[in-house]
Image (tube, rainbow, N blue to C red):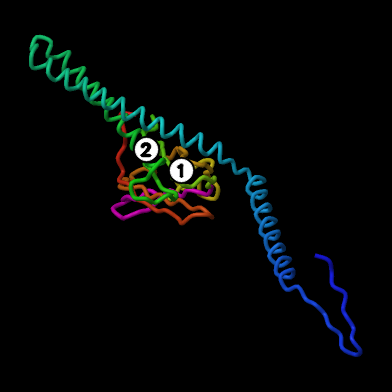
Amino acid sequence: MAEFEPLRTGQLVIRRHAPWRRRLIGWGGLLLAVLVLYGVYEWGRFDAGHNQLAVALQRSELQARVESLEQANEELRGRIAAVDTTRDVDRQSYADVERSLGELQAQVLRQSEELTFYRGIVAPTDGIGGLRIQRLEILPGGIERHFRLRLVLVQSMRQDAVVSGTVGIDVEGVLNQSPTRIALPEMGGAGANEGRLPFSFKYFQNVEQDIELPEGFEPLAVTVEVRSARQAAVRQSFPWQVDTTG
């Protein structure tokens, strides 16, 4: 609509206003501001390396792994049932059947542990999607008083950003009949940054460290503390149990 020129009648000035035009301009400016802010937000996500397609592919691969393990476990349970039946029918091959049964049961146990591990990443049972300590293994080091600590850190797929931080490890026990706590630097923790081990991962990471315990020290537990700038610190204690099967 064309602009209206003011009409003058004597000394009286009459102006015709169009309030709908001001409202239209205001709403248009607001919409433009929202579009600009959204564009800046999307550019920031892209510039930071956010890749929804990559995250979706990784989630799909882990979910497929979970389904494959579930199917494999069902097949193994069926084979165990068949072997158990054969054992009752054919007593002459009892030893072979027992050995096969033991191997199958061990395989089911390993796959069940792996299945639990991947389920903890895809969909944690407690509903918490933050950083956590999945497990700690203590392995013999081949030399007396030498051991290797193998720590598995995970975070749920609900968190699609890389998490980084440090891990602190203490061993509690008894030395000269007194309760004693030994920190990582005192156990020869080579590679530790100021007594802590660095980590950086998206879904899970293995952290391994060789240690040497002092003469006469009797270990009882291992305390692990995980710190990250983006998530709450996690602290957990594990009993000292050396895994001689690994």
Tell whether 4 sits left or right of 85: right
In depth, the one of 31 and 97 nearer the eye is 31
Rendered location of residue 126, percent (x, y): 34, 50
Q: Which mark is residue 157?
A: 1
Q: Is residue 19 left or right of residue 60?
A: right
Q: Secondary structure at mark 1?
A: loop
Residue 44, horizontal then vertical, whole percent: 66, 50
Say which quadrant the C terminus sits in.
top left
Magenta segment, which residues? 164-182
The residue that mark 2 highlights is: 117
Residue 161 vs residue 67, the one in the foreground: 67
Q: Is 129 on the left or on the right of 24, as rendered? A: left
Relative image position of residue 41 (x, y in whole percent): 64, 53
Secondary structure character of the magenta stretch overall: strand
Q: Are there few (<14), some (14-19), or many (20+) residues within 10 Å of tag 1?
A: many
Up/down of 163 relative to 107, above or below: below
Three-letter amino acid code at the position of disc 1: Met
Taking the magenta stretch, the answer to whether it contains residue 130 is no
Task: First in sequence, mark 2 or 1: give its number.
Answer: 2
